[in-house]
Image (tube, rainbow, N blue to C red):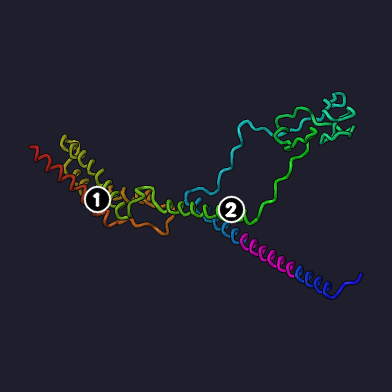
Amino acid sequence: MTVSFEEYAALARQLSEQRRAGEQHAATEAARRRDLHAAVDYLQQRLTAQGHRLDQLGRAIGIDQPPPAPPAAGSAPFTPSPPSSAGSAPSTPPGTGDGGDAGAAGVPGRPGVGAYPAELAAGEARLALPTAVSPAGVGVPAQRAAAVDPTVELELARRMADEADRHGQQAELLAQRPALLPTWSPLARAVAVYAGCGAAAGVLVLALVLASGVGLVDGFTLGAWICAGLPAVAFFGGYLVLGRWGRPAMVAGTPPRYLPLGFLICFLVVPMAYCAYLLLVRGLR
């Protein structure tokens, strides 16, 4: 059989086109693999950074590591049941042909192989492989799941990482807010705390005035507590409250406590409460 020059040239062109298509497919596949490896490396770096950030958040709120999950209630370790003795013959499943024992997969025509028990224990039933029943009634292992696309899996992992970043940012914003009056500014929070401590000290001033009226407290002691004692107690109380509940869990440095403002408020509120009490008493008279 002779081959003409035109047929030889057409065959050469076809082979050349197939070679170029194969090279192009190989280059495309190599580029896709490089992109997948780059995406995996980038995602791994993101997950590592997220892990470090979560560790920082845990240490900030006082959790070093998550507690181990407790065991499920009523769970017991799996212990396989002993094999059946030679004297107890298991029930013969249908389709064995010669009436012998069925094999491991229940295939007919395999005598001499021990069959599975008809009723499995609770633990064995949970660990048994899923089986698909053939038309002949023979139990065969179920088909494996189809191979997943790595591009789809990476896209799902990227979306989960984005969601984790969003929740992490929300957690950081919450961690940057103090427990006491979280939506207030630091100045307004300090004013409210010092004013509240001064008001509590003013209530104690009224109690001392009433005690002085019945002769339990002399005038010098009353004046000392009004002018110095109770204002100092209110000032240090506000200072401690701001340091304990007015400090965010995650903050760079020490938040301001406005000491001059707190000193002024506390040493003005207490004497003003005493003056207001005197004016009230004189007005009622």
Q: Which residue is mark 1?
A: 266
Residue 188 tag number? none
* Residue at position x 59%, y 42% in the image: 68
Most foreground residue, 73 or 3: 3
Which of the 4 image quarters holds residue 91?
A: top right
Q: Relative to residue 187, is residue 105 depicted above or below?
A: above
* Residue at position x 62%, y 54% in the image: 152
Queried whether the magenta region covers residue 189, the answer comes back as: no
Q: Is residue 143 left or right of residue 39?
A: right
Q: Where's residue 157, x and y in %?
A: 59, 54
| Range covered by the magenta-colored residues | 20-40
> Where's the N terminus, which quadrant?
bottom right
Q: Secondary structure at mark 2?
A: helix
The amino acid at mark 2 is Leu
Q: Which residue in the rendered view is the most extreme toward the top?
A: 87
Q: Nearer the viewer, mark 1 or mark 2?
A: 2
Most foreground residue, 21 or 97: 21
